Amino acid sequence: MKTINYAKTGKKIHRIGFGAWQLGNTEFWGHMSVEEGIALVDEAIKKGVRLFDTAPGYASGLSETIIGLAIQGRREDVVINTKFGHTAEGETDFSVFSLRDQIQSSLTRLQTDYLDSIVLHNPSMDILLGQTMHVQELKKLKEEGLIRSFGVSIDTFEEFKAVLEHLDVDVVEILFNVFFQDPAELFEKAHQKGIAIIAKVPLDSGWLTGKYDEFSEFEGIRSRWDDQTILRRAELVKDLKSIVRADDLTPYAINFILSFPEVTAVIPGIRNIEQLQKHLHHQDYVLTKTMKQAMQALYKNKIEKDPLPW
């Protein structure tokens, strides 16, 4: 797999990363033992995956713990991106004064003495507008060697624009996929600033795999969709299947994102070995220019003026 520089860490990664929300997360994603999680991360590393995206709030810290157990003896082989603002105890705390303590807690769970990157996990707009001291404190922690780069994890074009205009960051993790294309307009500006771009929610919580339709029933985090939203997404999925002439949308959805050269990495959630193998297999697919343009036209004509709820 081709490698790419990650942020300003001096490390290289492959563009397919590992979204680790599912690790040990029985609340939303079904049973996964610690041993199964370690084996999954181990297999990912063996297959060449280098970027692991986690957070203290994922499975109450267990996601970080599993990664920490799996990477022993090969810390320099991987890039760990974790988050700040939502603690393993289920609390929301974006206080500048808790930055160091929250990072130390993540380091303990990850069994390491540094983070490759840390991102503020959906912070408020005042932080994104540079009206707080978060960046100054993060720069101090970077100088100390506790972190090697930092940034934000955000969802919208407006937030992305605010970051680019007001914050000096190394990494932006942004919601971006076929159904959420607005951020692409800002990719070049971010690239010019030397910012690593991580695309999160690349499969729209499963819709862009093609496995859901208007008759699907949802539980857990996916139960947030109302009937109208489900019907609309189902129609859009049908449109996409017509464009690519296939029922499995995953390779096309992932490679739509990778077709933007400014995107550093994409982080699909991975629950099992089968999903891991499929994503690694899909990365070699090259989206045709015609398909990409059709996907962009679908967004412009059916979504842009009436955005989908996440």
Image (tube, rainbow, N blue to C red):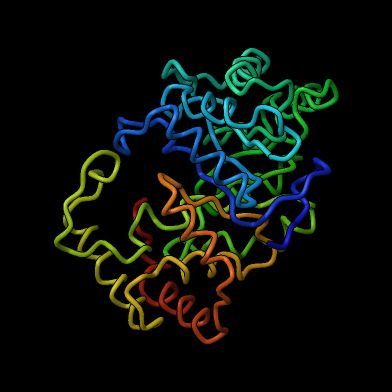
Q: Quadrant of residue 32?
A: top left
Q: Quadrant of residue 94?
A: top right
User: Which residue is found at the position 57% from the left and 59% from the top?
Assistant: 183
User: Which residue is found at the position 55% from the left and 44% from the top?
Assistant: 43
The x, y position of residue 24, in whole percent, is 40, 30
Q: Quadrant of residue 235?
A: bottom left
Residue closest to the eye, 110 or 180: 110
Is 291 placed above or below 67 here?
below
The x, y position of residue 112, in whole percent, is 69, 22
Is 12 placed above or below 191 here?
above
Horizontal side of 200 relative to 235 (left or right) equals right
The x, y position of residue 203, in whole percent, is 42, 58
Which residue occupies the extreme bottom position in the image?
A: 290
Which residue occupies the extreme left position in the image?
A: 215
Number of residue marks: 0
The x, y position of residue 63, in whole percent, is 49, 29
User: Which residue is found at the position 67% from the left and 26% from the top?
Assistant: 132
Q: Where's the N terminus, which quadrant?
A: bottom right
Horizontal side of 54 relative to 145 (left or right) equals left
Residue closest to the eye, 179 or 32: 32
